[in-house]
Image (cartoon, grey):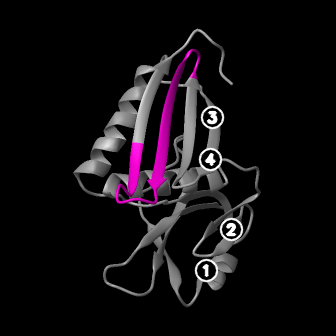
Amino acid sequence: MKSSAFALIFLLLLINSPFAQAQDSISIAGRPLRLGVTREEISSSLRPTHHLRRLEGVRRLEGVSADTWIVVTTAGPPFESLGTLTFEHDRLISIDKTWGNFRGPEAIRLGEVLSALISRNAQGGVAVAIVTTRSGREPQIAGQGIDLTFGNITLSLVVIEHSSEAGRVVVVNESLSQRPPR
């Protein structure tokens, strides 16, 4: 059940995320954030439910000092982190959104399986894939899926929901085919 919930959330977030759709903003705490906005504008828009907390000693990959802040809830403890924002000359240059933290052995196992399958298809640490989504509904059953196709190998993650006692099930499948991807 936990891995089903994890996979369903993963699929819905991926399918509905800015990653899957061309957009000029990412929503954090229900507010659309756009590159180029000032830190004060963002901080004001997040109040009173969230605030920015500076992360010290963070450096961007290029070695340039970064002004990085974490978006956290004001209610707590525990405080929830929703993502990080990086500024340069007081303008937003990077948004990293936290989609969730999934715990438990089934969630860990699902992450390990996906990581292993994708890594195995990577060449030089890079895996280029064609991503397709699908969904369907029949009487008594509904499904949502995502396929990652690496050449002639396809990794499928499908969440199937039965109206019977079977409930939800997550299926991870790897297939090899001589046919080109759909």
Q: Give the CA separation, mark 4 to mark 1.
A: 38 Å
Q: Which labelled disc corresponds to residue 43?
A: 1
Q: Give the CA separation, mark 3 to mark 4.
A: 14 Å
71 or 174, which lies in front?
174
Residue that badge 2 annotates: 33
Residue 89 visible in the snapshot: no
Q: Give the CA separation, mark 2 to mark 3.
A: 26 Å
Helix, strand or loop under label 1: helix
Q: Residues within 10 Å of mark 2 (few under 14, many from 20)?
A: many
Indicate the position of residue 61 as horizontal and vertical percent values. 52, 41
Q: Which labelled disc corresponds to residue 135?
A: 4
Which residue is painted at 66% across and 79% down in the image? 40
Nearer to us of marks 2 and 4 is: 4
Looking at the image, is mark 1 or mark 2 earlier in the sequence? 2
Q: How many marks?
A: 4
27 or 74, which lies in front?
27
* Quarter of the image that includes the N terminus: bottom left
Helix, strand or loop under label 2: strand
Is 90 placed left or right of 103 in the picture?
right
Which residue is painted at 48% across and 57% down in the image? 9
